[in-house]
Image (cartoon, rainbow, N blue to C red):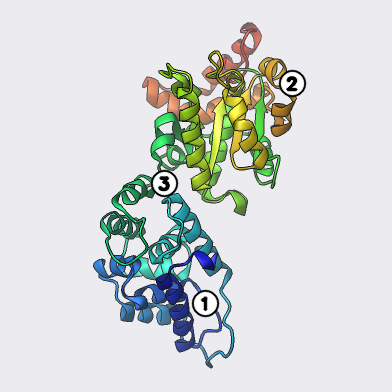
């Protein structure tokens, strides 16, 4: 990774080591990297921090307040803390996300902000800096920066960065919906009693390969709710380390196909989406009615979506959660052995009557607010019982 560092970024690492020695610390933490970024003084990161009124002395003072001075000066090699290593890994991810093939001081600062929990982030917050503002400042400087950092930080890169700065992305936002953002904004319904299924999805997503779950269940049993539950778990941080900071996007195949009149239009769009997913590296895609992939967009002589996605799924470059009904799974997936191998099925059973009643009670507030009425416990129990007895062509909890 270090071979991708610009001269300034390498200098930051050397200065971080010097700062650690000055404070008699026998490790390099995120705080020393922050001190190195400011000490370097000429890169995009230093300019962004300077413009927000963050000085070297103020940061040193805060670091001494939080951690204090060590007893004796370390000798020899000073190792990075796991958190500092994570920051450097995130800086590579930030660089790739902005379409840059080098790691500059700006990417290290963006990595510090994205990590968001180390001493460096605490220091910035204590000095009154809003981490999102710091991020925006870096992006702004990048878009107009004509300094001596390597070429390629042109306005285009800056604009692209601005798109990704808010955790959004132009192509994916056009053809999908960010479920993690919706969960953060409290726009998703609460998920009740699907812990086993959500945990199984997490287990499969955390594998190194064969890591694409497909939820199989009758219409209306709550397959999409399981995925929304996962989005809420990501936001709360109740997920394994491998899934932290992931963005969960629901991809709308309909809007991808809509308006693709000429042969190749659809493939072009799908390739743009997959390129963006691969570049960012932190996206999980949810495709509802995933059986529509087989044959989607396949006009005469064109290839269907499944054929484009199969190699990416096999290499693990595209993490996908699918949802489909049992009939459609048998009809499309079991016929196509290559596609079936790439997905791990998870059965989502119809909830029992008491479970369905609990689900309705959990959603009661939302329905009361929407219909401007009050719903009693008796009404909920009656709705579930009557639906269970008389509505035979649909499934709980949807029919209740």
Q: Position of residue 223 (x, y in %)?
A: 60, 27
Q: Which residue is mark 1?
A: 28
Residue positioned most to the bottom: 72
Where's the N terminus, which quadrant? bottom right
Q: Residue at x 62, y 18 (%)?
A: 396
- Asked whether 162 or 388 is in front, the reply is 162
Q: Which residue is mark 2?
A: 334
For this view, does 297 lie left or right of residue 174?
Answer: right
Q: With respect to residue 309, does 53 lie above or below?
A: below
Disc number for residue 328: none
Q: Position of residue 324 (x, y in %)?
A: 63, 22
Tell us which disc is closer to us: 2 or 3: 2
**How many numbered circles does the render carry?**
3
Gap between marks 2 and 1 measured at Cα: 53 Å
Residue 222, can we see it? no
Tell us which disc is closer to us: 2 or 1: 2
Q: Secondary structure at mark 1?
A: loop
Q: Residue at x 69, y 18 (%)?
A: 326
Dots 3, 1 in contact, CB < 8 A: no
Q: Secondary structure at mark 3?
A: loop
Q: Which residue is mark 3?
A: 167
């Amino acid at each position: 990774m270090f071979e991708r560092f610009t001269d300034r970024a390498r200098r930051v690492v050397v200065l971080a080591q010097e700062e650690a020695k000055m404070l008699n610390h026998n490790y390099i933490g995120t705080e020393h990297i922050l001190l190195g970024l400011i000490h370097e003084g000429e890169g995009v990161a230093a300019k962004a921090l300077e413009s927000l009124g963050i000085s070297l002395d103020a940061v040193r003072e805060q670091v001494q307040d939080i951690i204090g001075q060590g007893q004796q000066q370390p000798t020899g090699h000073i190792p990075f803390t796991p958190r500092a290593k994570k920051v450097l890994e995130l800086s590579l991810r930030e660089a790739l996300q902005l379409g840059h093939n080098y790691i500059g001081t700006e990417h290290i600062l963006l990595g510090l902000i994205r990590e968001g929990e180390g001493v460096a982030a605490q220091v910035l917050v204590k000095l009154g800096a809003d981490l999102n503002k710091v991020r925006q400042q870096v992006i702004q400087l990048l878009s107009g920066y004509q300094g001596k950092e390597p070429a390629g930080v042109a306005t285009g890169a800056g604009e692209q960065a601005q798109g990704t700065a808010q955790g959004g992305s132009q192509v994916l936002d056009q053809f999908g919906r960010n479920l993690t953002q919706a969960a953060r904004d409290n726009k998703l319904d609460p998920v009740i009693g699907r812990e086993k299924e959500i945990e199984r999805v997490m287990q499969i997503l955390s594998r190194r390969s064969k890591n694409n779950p497909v939820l199989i269940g009758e219409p209306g049993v709550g397959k999409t709710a399981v995925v929304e539950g996962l989005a809420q778990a990501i936001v709360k941080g109740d997920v394994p380390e491998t899934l932290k900071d992931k963005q969960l996007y629901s991809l709308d195949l309909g809007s991808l196909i809509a308006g693709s009149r000429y042969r190749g239009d659809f493939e072009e769009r799908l390739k743009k989406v997959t390129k963006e997913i691969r570049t960012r590296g932190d996206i999980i895609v949810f495709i509802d009615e995933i059986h529509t992939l087989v044959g989607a967009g396949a006009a005469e002589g064109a290839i269907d979506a499944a054929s484009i996605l199969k190699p990416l799924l096999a290499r693990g470059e595209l993490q996908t959660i699918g949802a489909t009904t049992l009939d459609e799974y048998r009809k499309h997936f079991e016929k196509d052995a290559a596609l079936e191998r790439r997905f791990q099925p998870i059965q989502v059973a119809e909830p029992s009557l008491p479970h369905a009643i609990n689900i309705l009670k959990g959603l009661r507030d939302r329905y009361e607010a929407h219909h401007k009425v009050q719903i009693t416990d008796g009404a909920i129990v009656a709705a579930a019982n009557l639906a269970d007895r008389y509505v035979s062509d649909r499934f709980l909890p949807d029919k209740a």
